[in-house]
């Protein structure tokens, strides 16, 4: 009797369950979408190579991915229909390493041409007027124009003015050229020691020559741009809005601000854009770690107080940007084996320098990852890569399981010792490459850099394929405005790197979509076109899955959809 009752109860349970399931399916089938994209080729990046014809969106979420016939049930009287006209639809693109405030900023208003002569530079600077800071600030010289000059760099700027302070940043941002008035304003003299990760170049008499490398150069702008006026902050905000427009025109719906100088109050611009509903991309801030600050625990405490990682927010502060090293042509990139010759720059070591050395970096990572921060570490030289991997490994050993996925990332990753290639996968460290610049392509190497490093080290410059083959997560990004922020140029170049090319366009798309989403910590919400995810898409003018590789870079984004809303449409091309 008890057994029969059990069977009856089980049957009743199954009947109720089946009825409920049918009702749920019926309800889902009758949901009318706010937006339907149809007649499309939607490459979903769902891990299975799925290509769909139609997508239905309710509110800001995807409720259907499938065929044109299947989507019909979601079309109602108020549904907005977007006929893609057979065009390719991609998940919203991610640029995980970019510098919007620098790209849109007006602080460095005296612009030089890197290929110009020293005399031309002086003439250009003479024509510039001091800005609201009372300084003449500029950008754009090639550092070797000054290194090879007959006199100290300071003397050429003193010809322009010995009363108005002048500071000009190099084209790479890794050195600063200043005049005597600037040195006096900064309190720099013969007795000033080099900061961590920086060099104040001094002449034979022991006096500052007017050239400052890496951290030393950074500190100039940190001081000049501190305590911005209301007008300065508004200029920064307007520059950010301009930069955001460039991203939406390129189909970028998520970005990583790869170096937020919080002491310059730059976060205020992002918060203002978010508050005013002007933030047209999901943005993750990487707070700058100041190497020259000697009290590491105090800086850690300040950074931890700024952490903000609400998954529902368009603005999150959840990453830390630190530099391991500098640049090869400045001989400041950190190398395992020394540079082959001296480039004429007054660097103490012929193996480069560290902004943050391995032990100090390990301490920062150990303390900051417990709060929730992920690291974004600039590494160009092979020693910089190795020491950063060591520091991450040390933090893992000390902290063990931190209750979440670590998403630490090395960016640039230009020179990697063969013994460290597999460590990216072993340590679950993301490798973030920038190949959108033509200078990264084989055959376009900088002659000076090649002479400093030699053919052996340069043969695997930017080892995208080697690290990809290990199974490690890789991303492609722009480093804009160092290179173009057009993702399709980056995809194309990633496939034109000879033996270091990605295997196919699908892997390049993944690097700009789902892998980027993982890097920014929201792969469960965006990065692919799947039911339940947020409705971020880019509709482009040609099928990059089938066209010749050398045509991919000419691809134009025609429509950008963010959170279920059309935020950009190229009306001339559509």
Image: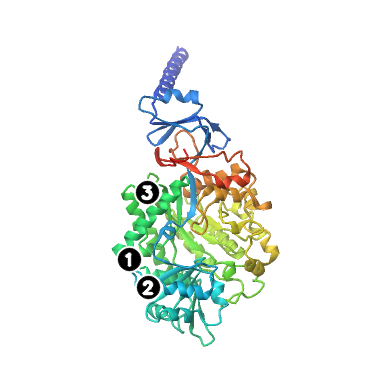
Q: Residues within 10 Å of mark 3 (few under 14, many from 20)?
A: many
Q: Secondary structure at mark 2?
A: loop
Quick check: 5 above or below 461?
A: above
Q: Which residue is mark 1?
A: 228
Quick check: 304 above or below 30?
A: below
Q: Residues within 10 Å of mark 1 (few under 14, many from 20)?
A: some
Q: Earlier in the sequence, mark 2 or mark 3?
A: 2
**Residue appearing at x 54%, y 72% in the figure:** 143
| Mark drawn on residue 135 | 2
Structural distance between the alpha carbons of marks 2 and 3 = 31 Å
User: Farthest bottom residue?
Assistant: 205
| Mark drawn on residue 167 | none
Residues at marks 1 and 2 touching, judged by CB atoms closer than 8 Å: no
Q: Image quadrant for the N terminus?
A: top left
Q: Secondary structure at mark 3?
A: loop
Q: Nearer the viewer, mark 2 or mark 3?
A: 2
Quadrant in which residue 421 is drawn: bottom right
Q: Kindly tell me whether residue 455 is visible in this rendering.
A: yes
Q: Earlier in the sequence, mark 1 or mark 2?
A: 2
Structural distance between the alpha carbons of marks 1 and 3 = 22 Å
Q: Position of residue 184 (x, y in %)?
A: 39, 81
| Mark drawn on residue 279 | 3
Query: Which one is nearer the viewer's eye here, 527 or 169?
Result: 169
Residue 361 lies left or right of residue 16; in this view the side is: right
Q: Earlier in the sequence, mark 1 or mark 3?
A: 1
Q: Nearer the viewer, mark 1 or mark 2?
A: 2
Residue 121 lies left or right of residue 472; in this view the side is: left
Q: Kindly tell me whether residue 293 is visible in this rendering.
A: no
Quadrant in which residue 106 is drawn: bottom left
């Amino acid at each position: 009797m008890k057994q029969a009752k059990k069977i009856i109860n089980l049957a009743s349970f199954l009947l109720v369950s089946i009825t409920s399931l049918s009702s749920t399916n019926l309800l889902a089938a009758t949901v009318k979408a706010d937006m339907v994209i149809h007649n499309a080729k939607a490459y979903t990046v769902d891990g299975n190579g799925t290509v769909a014809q139609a997508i239905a969106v309710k509110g800001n979420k995807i409720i259907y991915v499938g065929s044109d016939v299947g989507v019909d049930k979601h079309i109602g009287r108020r549904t907005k229909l977007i006929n893609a006209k057979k065009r390719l639809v991609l998940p919203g693109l991610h640029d995980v390493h970019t510098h919007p405030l620098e790209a849109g900023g007006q602080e460095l208003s005296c612009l030089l041409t890197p290929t110009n002569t020293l005399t031309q530079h002086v003439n250009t600077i003479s024509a510039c007027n001091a800005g609201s800071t009372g300084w003449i600030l500029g950008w754009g010289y090639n550092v070797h124009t000054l290194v090879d000059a007959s006199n100290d760099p300071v003397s050429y700027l003193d010809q322009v003015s010995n009363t108005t302070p002048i500071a000009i940043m190099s084209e790479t941002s890794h050195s600063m050229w200043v005049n005597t008035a600037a040195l006096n304003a900064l309190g720099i003299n013969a007795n000033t020691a080099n900061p961590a990760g920086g060099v104040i170049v001094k002449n034979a008499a022991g006096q500052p020559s007017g050239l400052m490398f890496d951290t030393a150069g950074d500190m100039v702008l940190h001081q000049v741009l501190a305590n911005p006026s209301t007008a300065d902050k508004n200029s920064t905000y307007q520059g950010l809005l301009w930069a955001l427009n460039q991203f939406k025109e390129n189909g970028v719906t998520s970005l990583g601000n790869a170096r937020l100088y919080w002491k310059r109050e730059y976060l205020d611009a992002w918060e203002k854009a978010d508050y005013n509903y002007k933030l047209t991309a999901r943005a993750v801030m990487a707070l700058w770690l100041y190497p020259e600050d000697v009290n590491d625990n105090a800086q850690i405490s300040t950074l931890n107080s700024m952490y903000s990682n609400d998954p529902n927010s368009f603005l999150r502060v959840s990453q830390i940007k630190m530099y391991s090293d500098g640049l090869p042509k400045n001989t400041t990139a950190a190398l395992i084996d020394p540079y082959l010759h001296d480039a004429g720059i007054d660097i103490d070591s012929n193996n480069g320098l560290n902004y943050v050395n391995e032990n100090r970096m390990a301490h920062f990572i150990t303390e900051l990852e417990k709060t929730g921060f992920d690291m974004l570490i600039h590494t160009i030289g092979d020693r910089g890569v190795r020491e950063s991997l060591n520091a991450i490994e040390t933090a893992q050993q000390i902290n063990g399981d931190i209750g979440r996925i670590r998403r630490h990332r090395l960016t640039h990753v230009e020179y990697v010792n063969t013994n460290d290639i597999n460590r990216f996968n072993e340590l679950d460290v993301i490798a973030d490459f920038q190949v959108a610049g033509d200078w990264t392509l084989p055959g376009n190497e900088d002659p000076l850099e090649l002479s400093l490093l030699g053919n052996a080290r340069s043969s695997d410059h930017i080892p995208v394929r080697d690290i990809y083959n290990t199974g490690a997560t890789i991303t492609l990004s722009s480093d804009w405005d160092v290179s173009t922020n057009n993702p399709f140029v980056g995809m194309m170049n990633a496939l034109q790197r000879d033996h270091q090319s990605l295997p196919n366009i699908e892997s390049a798309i993944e690097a700009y979509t789902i892998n980027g989403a993982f890097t920014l910590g929201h792969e469960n919400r965006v990065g692919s076109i799947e039911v339940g995810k947020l409705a971020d898409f880019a509709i482009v003018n040609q099928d990059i899955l089938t066209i010749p590789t050398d045509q991919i870079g000419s691809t134009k984004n025609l429509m950008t959809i963010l959170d279920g809303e059309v935020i950009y449409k190229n009306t001339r091309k559509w």
